[in-house]
Image (spheres, helix red, strand yellow):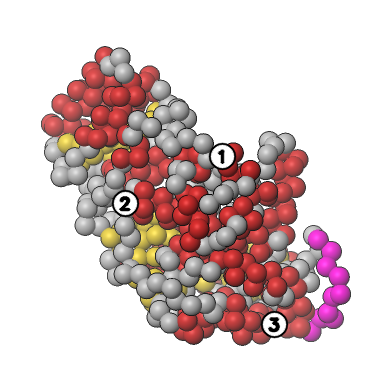
Amino acid sequence: MAMNNTLAQISQRANPFFEMGFYLLPISFSSAEDAARKLGEAREGLTGSEDFEGFIRAQLSKLDASQPYALSILGASRADLLAELERAQESLPGAFESGRDWQTPTGSYFSPHPLGAQARIAFVYPGAFGTYVGMGRQLFQLFPQLSESLDVLTDDPEHAMNAEVIFPQTDDPQVIAALQDKLQHQPTLMISSGIFFSYLFTVILQDIFNIQPSAAFGYSLGENSMMFASGIWTQADAMRTSLEASPLFHERVSGRQNAIREYWQLPDSAVYEEGKSIWANYILMASEEKVRAAIQPGERVYITHINTSRQVVIGGDEAACLRVAESLKCMHLKAPYEHAIHCQPVESEFEAFERMHYWPVEHKPEILVYSAADYTPLEMESHSIARSFAHMLTHAVDFPRLVEQVYADGARVFIELGAGSNCSKWVDAILKDRPHASMTINQNNVSDNVSILKLLARLIGQRVPLDLSVLSAAE
């Protein structure tokens, strides 16, 4: 596949992890006593080795999947790794004794009660509106083979990923802010970019590191990303065309929001002035029960998302939303998007959403693929999927209910594959002290190599089976 300039410029070396200057040093062992010995050996080897990178490669290759425990050390230099090793030597006896995971701000990690090789993995796909400028900038440099994987979904990866917006050839803060604002006000850009990043993250985990899920679920429009990442849908270019041609995200639930105007019996708007939406979304730090009780009958406020037992999203008339928030005296924050979904005023768009999500089932994965339509695995049939997605997008999302169902069905390791870490934090808040591990592959303002190595460090510590050969390769 011939790539255009933007993607080509960030896809240069086959294995740049060492060149980027952040290292993963894994150490496996059988007991606390064995850990003390192995950590001592690693420290001696790291101190005395003349070939620093060769030593790291050897340690990566020596990771023993049969051992019950593993420590992951992360650092940006030999000195950093030695300092982290010293902290581990001091702290691991206490971790074994207390039974609590050990982790440093750098990302070094150890679990005295790993979930183990048999733990079922769920891939979690966050909502579409978290995509940000600069996201995934290093992915094609870290994994040049990703460019070929895009052939499955698109004939024009640069256009499909909105590379001119996502990968600007400047660091000018004003330009970045303007591009981010453009993303926020053009939901089709957000949705299409989110789909492709989730797909790429999935390829990285499944095909490159051989991390295999048993389940997948998404948050809101993240269910679209899930379908492409799981291989169920492949016609991403056609969906992009459908999104751009449909009035749904241009004037029905976004832009002029005539679906809302009709429901509220307001006059249609012939012109949409950016920044003057009739709809606002607010995140409230309060329970669903309290928020529901605070909404007065007939008030133009609707619960759209239940994120955790203590975090709810409401949407509607801005003054009414603020009245609800202030009456609860709770912390609240205006969401950075003004689109209206997951609520009664957009039920008129059910058929349009259904048409938008009617696509051939190209592949039936051997994993459970869940939807918040019924909080059960999807039936792999085009009409059923389209109806489920239309229902999901016109009704509130109960994320705790979805997570609880996936957990009840056996998932214990939850990996977020999209922008940021909201879903992984919510999973932790929902499952609390029950055995599980929740983590993300992407963090805003963190380099891709660092965030990926931090994820691998957690997975190694939990003894999840994986393949690190791409990290230990010399070239």
Q: Which residue is mark 2?
A: 210
What's the CA distance linking mark 3 and mark 2?
A: 52 Å
Q: Is the residue marked by circle 1 packed among few (<14), some (14-19), or many (20+) residues within 10 Å? A: some
Residue type marked 2 = Asn
In the depicted view, which residue is nearer to us: 389 or 329?
Answer: 389
Q: Quadrant of the C terminus?
A: top left
Quarter assignment of residue 319? bottom right
Answer whether residue 422 is visible to the viewer in this image: no
Q: Which residues are magenta?
A: 265-274
On residue 10, the disc is 1
Residue type marked 3 = Gly
Question: Could you tell which of marks 2 and 1 lies nearer the N-terminus?
Answer: 1
On residue 101, the disc is none
**Residue displayed at 22% across by 51% down:** 116
What's the CA distance linking mark 1 and mark 3?
A: 53 Å
In the depicted view, which residue is nearer to us: 314 or 340?
Answer: 340
Q: Is the residue marked by circle 2 packed among few (<14), some (14-19), or many (20+) residues within 10 Å? A: some
Residue 450 inside the magenta-drawn segment: no
Answer whether residue 162 is visible to the viewer in this image: yes
Secondary structure, mark 2, is: loop
Magenta stretch prevailing secondary structure: loop
Question: Could you tell which of marks 1 and 3 lies nearer the N-terminus?
Answer: 1
Which percent across, then down, holds residue 397? 52, 72
Q: Foreground mark, 3 or 2?
A: 2
Residue type marked 1 = Ile
